[in-house]
Image (cartoon, grey):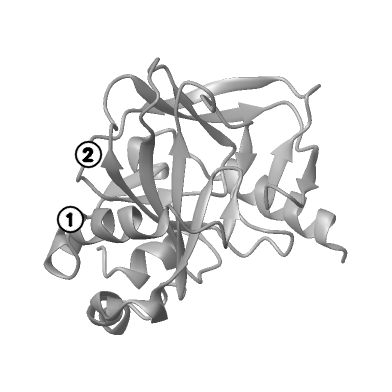
Amino acid sequence: MDMEATIKNHLEEVYANLTGTPTDFLIPVNFLDEYIKTEDFIKIYNDIIVDKKNRFGYGHKVYTDDFPVFDRIRKRFPKLKNYFYFLKTNRVVKTYPIHIDGPGEFDSKAGINWPLLNCDSDSDTIWYTVDKHEFYYHDIQNSIFLNDDVVATELHKFNFVDKTPYLFRGDVWHTGINRKNQRDFRVMVKWELSVQNWKEAQDALSIS
């Protein structure tokens, strides 16, 4: 089976089992603060934003092996990948197309989204149901985007607030919208888990 068919089959199974409850899309994981602090992420963010390496249109890729502060959380939760992203939007880059997470091999079904800076009620994260699963892979953006002609209907809307991490479901069509009219970036960590479905993601973080 080719990758496009694999992704479509996965999406059809996901949508067949959605109940529409908030925990279908995200679950608070405040206990992670025992292993890593928001302030640790912010310090690293301030250190690396001047570096033009590992930069995508939506932010910066950071390899955790370069920072010993991540050793403890990675040892406790080994399904965390050895890298994460600082996702950034502001008045110039205000939104991101409707997408599912994961590069071309579609290996990002879920992860931790940890809001750091300027995340509040002026920024929405929205998940959608669609009339068909038609998409394309955008190599530069490293994302799987929904085709423009697909009809998308809102399923769930959520506002992240700074310093409150969530287990985030990435294999349901979603987008982020930043309504702030400011130069300062809205910044969030996206740290993927090596899992194949939402249940595995919860198990990886010992969520009962």
Q: Amino acid at mark 2?
A: Asp
The residue that appears at 44% across and 27% down in the rendered structure is: 90
The disc at residue 152 is: none
1 vs 2, front mark: 1
The answer to the question of whether label 1 and label 2 lie on touching residues, with beta carbons closer than 8 A, is: no
Residue at 73% across, 54% down: 7
Choose between 46 and 57: the one closer to the eye: 46
- Residue at the far front: name it: 50
Three-letter residue code for mark 1? Glu
Please name whichever residue, 93 or 202, is drawn nearer the observer in this view of the structure: 93
Q: Is residue 127 above or below residue 67?
A: above
Q: Where's residue 20, x and y in %?
A: 43, 33
* Residue 162's disc number: 2
User: In the depicted view, which residue is nearer to us: 199 or 97?
Assistant: 97
- Residue depicted at x 15% and y 61%: 33
Query: Helix, strand or loop at disc 1?
Result: helix
Query: Can you give x and y, in whole percent of width and height, for residue 99 in the image?
Result: 63, 39
Query: Where is residue 64 shown, x and y percent of the image?
Result: 39, 74
Q: Quadrant of the N terminus?
A: bottom right
Q: Residues within 10 Å of mark 2 (few under 14, many from 20)?
A: some
**What residue is pinned by disc 1?**
39
Instruction: Give the residue furthest to the left.
Output: 34
Pick whichever, 73 or 129, lies toward us. 73
Mark 2 falls on what kind of element? loop
- Identify the residue at image location x=59%, y=50%: 101
